[in-house]
Amino acid sequence: MKTAIYPGSFDPVTYGHIDIIKRGANLFDKLIVAVLLNPSKKPLFSVEERVELLKAVTYDIPNVEIDYFDGLLVDYAKKVNANAIIKGLRMVSDFEYEFQMALINKKLNPSVETIFLMTNAKYGYLSSSVVKEIAQFGGCLSEFVPDIVAQKLMEKFSDN
């Protein structure tokens, strides 16, 4: 069975992420969408909230599993018997960082390949940071995130 991991912070999940998830799921027998617990970032949503939102927006993709991890991605890949890591690229600037990470991961675990998927052109500008900023100021989110994510964002910002 060919298994891939699509790691990220997903704070929050966007239509751009969902596009990569669907395309990655078509390429592998199993795709694990793994929320990274990054101690250097202060996320808006807890890891549990991010996992629940991902489950809600991927419920109809049978070969997708949602999980979370901390530590090295290659260690997590070994733990879940993954053959590949999927990374979505929006801009050339994404490539520089992701290429470096792919080389490091390959050095740490030569049996895991990194697969780069170019974003759909209509999501090239989209990021979780931009979505949070739009939500913070009460902007319309319908073109950027599913309704359940927009609702949770509005709840977060109405509490502040």
Image (cartoon, rainbow, N blue to C red):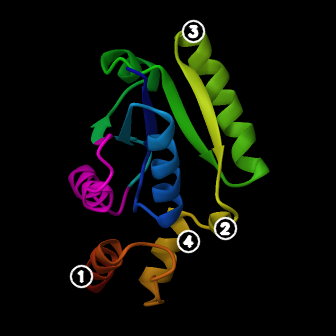
Q: Quadrant of the N terminus?
A: top left
Of helix, strand and loop, which one carries label 4? helix
Q: For the residue marked with disc 2, what is the amino acid?
A: Tyr
Name the residue beneath numbered marker 1: 159
Of helix, strand and loop, which one carries label 3? loop
Of helix, strand and loop, which one carries label 1? loop
Q: For the residue marked with disc 1, what is the amino acid?
A: Asp
Q: What is the magenta range? A: 43-65
Q: Are marks 4 and 2 in contact (CB under 8 Å)?
A: yes
Q: Are marks 4 and 1 in contact (CB under 8 Å)?
A: no
* Coordinates of residue 157 in the picture (x, y in percent): 32, 81
* Coordinates of residue 90 in the picture (x, y in percent): 68, 54
Examine the rendered structure and indicate whether residue 8 appears above or below residue 82: below
Name the residue beneath numbered marker 3: 110
Looking at marks 4 and 2 on the same chain, the residue that comes earlier in the sequence is marked by 2
Gap in angstroms between the C-alphas marked 1 and 3: 46 Å
- Residue 125 has which mark? 2
Circle nearer the viewer, 4 or 2:
2
